[in-house]
Image (tube, grey):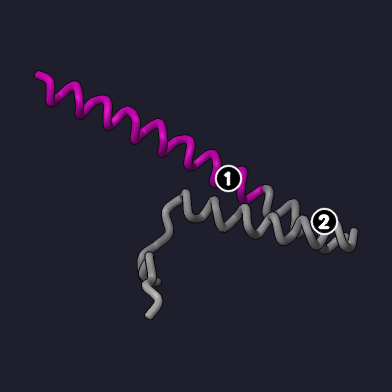
Amino acid sequence: MQMMWRHMSIQDDTHDKLTKAYMAYFKANEQFAKRRSLATKVAARKALAEIRILARTRRKELTTEFEDSRNQKTHNQK
């Protein structure tokens, strides 16, 4: 039996969403390379815009996680 590493009801974190957004862009870009139409261009650009939004969100999360970790270490040393 195949083991599922993530349950369907668990919401994806930003990293997972970013990975999925890249895969969507990859597919859209392949379609654009095969057939340069308005629809394929729009799909690729939309996927890139989603990546940009998710990348900004993840950057903020990384900073917050780092600061929280740093503050926790400082607090534990006192």
- In this view, the residue in front, 63 or 77, is 77
Which element is circle 2 on?
helix
Q: Residue 51, position in %: x, y?
A: 61, 48
Q: What amino acid is labelled 1 in the image?
A: Ile
Which element is circle 1 on?
helix
**58 left or right of 11 in image:** right
Point out the stretch of residues depicted in magenta. Answer: 49-78
- In this view, the residue in front, 46 or 66, is 66
**36 left or right of 16 in image:** right
Q: Quadrant of residue 5?
A: bottom left
Magenta stretch: includes residue 53 = yes
Q: Give the crowd class for mark 2: few <14, some 14-19, many >=20 residues within 10 Å.
A: some
Magenta stretch: includes residue 72 = yes
From the image, give the main secondary structure of the stretch colored magenta.
Answer: helix
Q: Residue 11, position in %: x, y?
A: 39, 62
**Disc assigned to residue 53:** 1
> Label 2, on which residue?
41
Q: What amino acid is labelled 2 in the image?
A: Lys
Residue at x-position 85% and y-position 56%: 33
